[in-house]
Amino acid sequence: MANHSDHAEHAGHPVVPVRTYVIIWLALLGCTGLTYGVALIDLGPWNIVVALMIAFFKMSLVVLFFMHVKQENNLTRLFVAGGFVWLLILLALTLNDYMSRGWLPEGHIWRPGP
Amino acid sequence: MSTAVQDPRTQSPVNYLNAEDGLKSWLLTTDHKRIAILYLISITVFFMIGGFFAVLMRLELATPPGDLFNSDTYNKLFTMHGIVMVFFFLVPSIPATLGNFLLPMMVGARDLAFPRVNLLSWYLYIIGGIFVVATVGLGGVDTGWTFYTPFSSTYSNTWVLPAIMGIFVAGFSSILTGLNFIVTVHKMRAPGMTWGRLPLFVWSQYATALIQILGTPVVAITLALCALERAFHIGIFDPSIGGDPILFQHMFWFYSHPAVYIMILPGMGVISELVTCFSRKRVFGYDFVAAASVGIAVIGFLVWGHHMFVTGQSMYASMVFSILSFLVAVPSAIKIFNWTATMYQGSIRYDTPMLYAFGFIGLFTIGGLTGLFLATTAIDVHLTDTYFVIAHFHYVMVGGMVMAYLGGIHFWWPKMTGRMYSEPWAKFSALIVFVGFNLTFFPQFILGYQGMPRRYHAYAPEFHVLNVMSSCGASILGIGYILPLIYLLASLKTGKPAGPNPWGAKGLEWTTQSPPTTFNFEKIPVVTEEAYAYAATTEEETVG
Amino acid sequence: MADQAADLNPGTLVEHEHSPFLRHHFEDMGQQFESSTLGMWVFLLTEIMFFGGMFGAYTVYRSMYPDAFASTSRHMIPWLGATNTAVLICSSLTMALAVRSAHLGSRKLVRWMLVLTMIFGLAFIGVKFTEYYLHWKDHLVPWLNFQYPEHPEFFYNAQILFCFYFFMTGFHALHMFVGLGLLSWLLIKNETTLFGPQYYSPVEITGLYWHFVDIVWIFLFPLLYLIGAHG
């Protein structure tokens, strides 16, 4: 694991060219338009799926390029990924309860008497 | 070294205690060691406040009828006891005191990564504490420390909002501490201090910090939503208008179960240090103990539904949570086995810290095993909301965690203060704590099994004898907690000056003077040996 | 006494000239930069869980009351939300350029990029509060004046959605205000501190924070504005 002696004397990552930022910016704007446009079409339950997929893609662009994660070391990437995994745990195990109501018999209900 | 009795604050050489004088130098310090002492004092105060509520509860429970307090007041007592003990004592205890003091030294750094954030963390804790004390002064809160809705959000007539504010703010204190520890362990280890050479106390603190940063924000937003509901009467958690109280419980326990691992993991870290030092042996299965710490932190996030078996969760989800709860016991058990194996064929010394370690290992085992009973859904249906649950968590929290805390305080006391405490008094006190603890809480297992419900101020007459035993035990336990306060404080004036390493322990913190200088190390050490590199045989060694 | 530097032996602490920005518990600027960045990422992790908790609660209620939630979308103004999304994306571009300029040591560019970012941020706030005002006029603010005459059977459930709307966008707006505060501080600091390759971490970590707030909005937009926007 890196110790302080491995750190470069200057700080930071290589400089990203302006062109890259502008391309990402245009891609983000385009995706926003796409999200809006798709929302006008009725895809039933797939509307939300498509919208979230586009949102994830946009988030990835911001994270990788604007937030420099593409240039970051594995440790930072692990932390970023870990955050989303943990959010997934919260959502998955909570929804696990709500979606499985009624799957199994809820136990014999004891009533007094014969 | 002179043996004349001197105040560590005036003796030479310069150390972190006497480097600067005056209240301002303490209240504006960024030295992690001074901040640790600030926390030590405040946490002790909150422990006494929480203990005070416990005393009142045990007085009431000494007789079957509810004759000392009415039920509303009793509700406030157990609520305040829970809030203060959980959020203002147990969660910060070892991380904010021993962790703050020792972590930088153990990794070979001069301070934590963000010293000013560290000070901010203490101030947030104090602000949170002021809210809670204000709540008590205004008349208390009666929702239980679990704040179940819709009682807390709609129907309670007590001071829920300031209590929530206090916990919310203190939660950020916890988050900042965790953040600081994580960055410190990743970025500020000394040359040669690889992950595989870190003391297990550091591994435990690191695992704890992960839980702090991942879990605390969720309880923050949960309590915030509850507070907003209470303020604006909207119905997010009110079932009569479409809200879901179970959702509150899911979100609340998502943090509050991992929170119990925030409470116990640092204690386990302390035990690793104590058992190795006082067996004069390297730990058995270092990799497994380290991995178990992280394992507890990770799996601990997957089990929260075991608090909700009877509240309306689906049967399927209960099964999933039950199985996962069995799984989380495995890494804890691994640690117990490894500590025991460490002691095997070691050269055991029965100094006070080791007595607390023995207490921990035995009592935590009992507490942990009874947790498995509760994780079994069919048994939990009968035992939930009875005194069995109370006994279970007090065994792990008090029999486990508080013993580890006391053991750690005693172990590192010479390092923090430059003084040795009175060993006979300390041993006596440890014995009192052990006897008092078991007398207080073992009867509660039986009471719970027999069906006495928790959070009731009156009970059926057949539970009287066991309750009397429990209340007697509580008074003995109280004495056991007051005694260290006295002899530890006395040692500051009359204790024998301690050298750098009175226990002959391994670890970078023991290479510095006692008390350490402000910046810990004149020169950052270079680490070349494994953790706990004690010699194989110890007959030849004499310990100073 | 207790002068911090006197406690240390300068000969062992640094073997060479070091940046005036080096804080003395760090060994070198590289360690300081990496620590600051990791620290901000860990903080953002806590923010993911904080907002995530709200997103989770929203998801549960949306799955419980899909029709009530869908009926609320006619009260949202998707093109305003989309505009605001675009505004934030532009602010992210200027923020990224501000970080780049700081890295390259161009004080003037940093100043202008920060100002532009703040202008976009203020524009976002302006649009948001306009929307809040419009919702208030339409009697859609819980506790203040919530009414739902077109679907009385959805009254309570729609009110829950609007609670989440105001809470989620409200907490987001709060984070925007904090961000604007950080940008103001940076703007002032930029006048007296020359950022450059040796030292630009305050700009970098403010950038990380700002981009994160943008990401939260990227998810808020489809979830709150576009639930049933078709038809």
Image: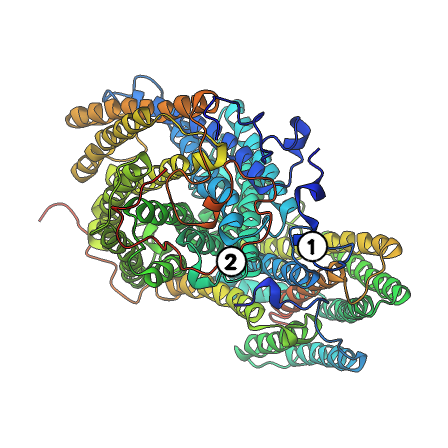
- Where is mark 1, residue-wise? C175
Is residue B319 among the parts visible in the rendering? yes
Q: Position of residue A90 (x, y in %)?
A: 46, 61
Q: Position of residue C155 (x, y in %)?
A: 56, 54
Between marks 2 and 1, how big is the CA–CA gap?
Answer: 20 Å
Is residue B144 among the parts visible in the rendering? no
Helix, strand or loop status at disc 1: helix
Question: Residue lying furthest top in this view?
Answer: B67
Quadrant assignment, res C117: bottom right
Residue at screen point 27% across, 23% down = B476
Query: Does residue B356 sit above or below A29 in this rendering?
Result: above
Residue at screen point 37% across, 43% down = B504
Q: Position of residue C86 (x, y in %)?
A: 76, 71
Residue C57 has which mark?
Answer: 2
Give me the chain letter of mark 2: C
Query: Does residue A93 sit above or below C86 in this rendering?
Result: above
Front residue of C185/B190: it is B190
Give me the chain letter of mark 1: C
Question: Residue lying furthest right in this view?
Answer: C108
Residue at screen point 66% across, 41% down = C7
Q: Dot 2 surroundings within 10 Å: few (below 14), some, or many (20 or more)? A: many
Is B322 situated left or right of C89 in this image?
left
Quarter of the figure that contains the C terminus of chain B: top left
Is B88 situated left or right of C193 in this image?
left
Task: State which tag comes first along the sequence, 2 or 1.
Answer: 2
Query: Does residue B386 sit above or below C195 in this rendering?
Result: above
Q: Position of residue C54 (x, y in %)?
A: 55, 57
Helix, strand or loop status at disc 2: helix
Query: Does residue B178 sit above or below B472 in this rendering?
Result: below
Q: Amino acid at mark 2?
A: Ala
